[in-house]
Image (cartoon, rainbow, N blue to C red):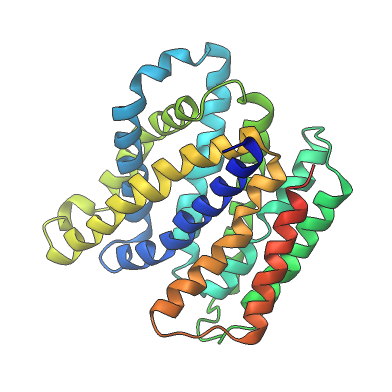
């Protein structure tokens, strides 16, 4: 598989993983609160990555650790809690729409803060993908409308964090392997996550069957949906452009809708049209 084929394969595969993560989060929130879920997700991911990548930590130059910590906070730590808290008060349709601002924020931040250059086709691709995402979201059933729009701002902050993170990795950490970056990221987050878990009240309810059942879903979410997915995502950032890598957020809603099909939900014609527009936008953003 050549580099061009590999980047498309990674984009689709990561979309499948992250698009499937929503059902795991939903199951996890049945027995856990957002802080417990976010902390456990990062702890399980950290333990998995330390097992397979502990030896790579010595390859991180001292001068790079500030970027490792910063990308850990922006790429995983803050968004994990922002999304978990926001989704307790707003509908999934609104969350999906706002998450689609990640490629746009990636492009804007990359151009103005990091001095990265983007071709006109990539800018058009971002715009097309955003239109498709809006069509996909707003042509839904609307049965999960927002109940508190003040929480929408939390999701938008998370997309800014994602956009900044992608640009930081591309500019400052491209010389490190994805395993090294991921292991460094989650090593930096392990202690803070344990502290949050301790004060979240988890250890007082961990014996409850409902909580234990939810933890099983978060183990899968942490290892596969966070640990493995981050490894692949960092590889995608290094071998493509920040905007192309961030366009994974356009494909995630499509995967989520297919999960809905498995649950006897049907896509409307407008939703199919939105999915096609998204795919075209991703194609444009990936052209060099």
Which of 52/171 is in front? 52
* Residue found 51% across the figure and 46% down from its top: 78
Task: Say whether residue 40 is left or right of residue 97.
Answer: left
Which quadrant is the C terminus positioned in? Answer: top right
Residue 207 at x, y percent in the picture: 11, 57
Which of 24/268 is in front? 268
- Can residue 153 be spotted in the picture? no
- Can residue 234 be spotted in the picture? yes
Residue 71 at x, y percent in the picture: 56, 34
Residue 11 at x, y percent in the picture: 58, 49
Position of 15 relative to 177 (above/below): below
Which quadrant is the N terminus positioned in? Answer: top right
Quarter of the view holding residue 129: bottom right
Which of 174/215 is in front? 174
Residue 108 at x, y percent in the picture: 79, 47
Task: Say whether residue 237 is left or right of residue 28.
Answer: right
């Amino acid at each position: 598989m050549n580099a061009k084929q590999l980047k498309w394969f990674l984009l689709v595969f990561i979309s499948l993983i992250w698009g499937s993560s929503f059902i795991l989060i939903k199951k996890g929130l049945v027995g856990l609160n957002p802080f417990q879920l976010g902390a456990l997700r990062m702890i399980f991911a950290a333990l998995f990555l330390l097992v397979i990548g502990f030896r790579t930590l010595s390859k991180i130059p001292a001068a790079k650790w500030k970027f490792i910590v910063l990308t850990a906070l922006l790429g995983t730590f803050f968004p994990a809690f922002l999304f978990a808290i926001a989704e307790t008060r707003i509908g999934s349709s609104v969350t999906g729409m706002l998450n689609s601002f990640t490629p746009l924020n990636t492009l804007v931040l990359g151009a103005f803060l990091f001095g990265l250059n983007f071709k006109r086709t990539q800018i058009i691709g971002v715009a097309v993908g955003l239109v498709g995402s809006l069509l996909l979201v707003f042509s839904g059933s609307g049965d999960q409308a927002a109940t508190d729009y003040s929480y929408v701002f939390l999701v938008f902050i998370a997309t800014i964090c994602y956009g900044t993170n992608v640009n930081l990795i591309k500019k400052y950490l491209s010389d490190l392997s994805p395993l090294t970056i991921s292991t460094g990221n989650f090593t930096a987050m392990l202690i803070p996550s344990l502290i949050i878990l301790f004060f979240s009240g988890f250890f007082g309810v961990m014996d409850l069957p409902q909580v234990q059942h939810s933890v099983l879903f978060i183990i899968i979410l942490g290892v596969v949906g966070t640990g493995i997915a981050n490894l692949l995502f960092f590889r995608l950032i290094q071998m493509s452009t920040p905007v192309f890598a961030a366009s994974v957020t356009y494909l995630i809603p499509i995967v989520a809708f297919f999960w809905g099909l498995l649950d006897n939900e049907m896509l409307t014609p407008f939703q199919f049209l939105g999915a096609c527009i998204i795919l075209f936008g991703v194609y444009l953003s990936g052209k060099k």
